[in-house]
Amino acid sequence: MVQAKDKASIDQWYVIDTEAQIPFGSSANRLLGFDLKVVRSEAEGVTVYCAGRDEPLPIRQRFGFIWTTLGTPERDVFPMPEADEPDRRYVPCGVVSVKASGLRIVENFLDMAHFPFVHTDILGSEPHTEVEHYNVEIRRDVDEVWATNCQFFQPQAALSATEGIMTQYIYRVMTPFTTLLYKTCPNSANRWDLICLFVQPVDVDRCRAHPVMYLIDEVSTTSSLIEFQQLIFLQDRIILENQRPVLLPLEPRSEIPTRADASSIAYRRWLKEKGVTYGTSAQAA
Ligand SMILES: [Fe+2]
């Protein structure tokens, strides 16, 4: 599928892998329909080249990942102060390839309505299917989408949760393809667990999702934490790969919104304002 790339998508930082995942020597990767060559050496570290260009691409090392860009981002990789808190568990959850638009993945991440049906008896259960009122705003000062005051009854909100709890959520969309959520922490009354999702759009309808968590949890093993997150993400993947239309429609009339969709509506409006068309059904002229 060929689609012209919009400047708004080009001028962003994207994760291509964790540093640990990148093999020494030369390896292939892909971003926004461009082939990348990634070279890692003991002396030089990681260098990323884009097919057809001589100069290496800019890179950043943040949150354990290598970030790169094909354009000239207005801002650096977004801030996430919780990542620097020394007592948090840093849990990268591997990479999941998904045959879907990267924007669909972000939109699904923001959606609470699917919890009881897709993550049955984990993140939701019948009869607790109602999405209660929450607040959504495009924060102009930081140019991010935030959904606050979200809550949902969850049978097993986290691996460390021993019984069902009313879980509070705050969602944050930092860039068109990166998002995170703050979530009630079963182990601490006054702090949040963080779950981040960094999406690497490989092609308009294909991407690699890089989930990573920053948790307050001194007990669970790392492998069990990763397993828990991967189980949830694989349940999402089935839904995402069967969603139609494949590309995200930005026109409000093309799908009928419900109250649960408030964050999706704000997200789509924000994308449209920015001029993002990559991974949407709005074909660039
Ligand atoms: Fe989900």
Image: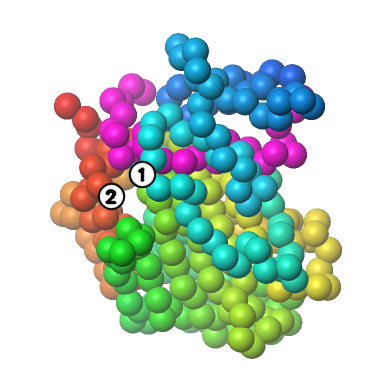
Q: Is mark 1 within 8 Å of ligand 1?
A: no
Question: Residue 160 lies in what quarter of the image?
Answer: bottom right
Question: Residue 157 lies in what quarter of the image?
Answer: bottom right
The answer to whether residue 152 is left or right of residue 216 is: left
Q: Is residue 182 above or below residue 15?
A: below
SS at badge 2: helix
Res 276 visible: yes
Amino acid beneath label 2: Leu
The answer to whether residue 124 is left or right of residue 137 is: right
Residue at the image position 42 percent from the left and 56 percent from the top: 174
Rendered location of residue 267, percent (x, y):
31, 57
Res 246 visible: no
Is 10 a magenta residue?
yes
What range is drawn magenta here?
1-24
Q: Work out whether mark 1 precedes mark 2 in sequence or the reverse, and give the earlier one.
A: 1
SS at badge 1: loop
Q: Is residue 7 above or below residue 167?
A: above
Q: Camera-side residue: 32 or 85? A: 85
Disc 2 target residue: 271
Amino acid beneath label 1: Glu
Disc 1 target residue: 74
Quadrant assignment for the C terminus: top left
Q: Residues within 10 Å of mark 2 (few under 14, many from 20)?
A: some
Residue at the image position 26 percent from the left and 55 percent from the top: 270
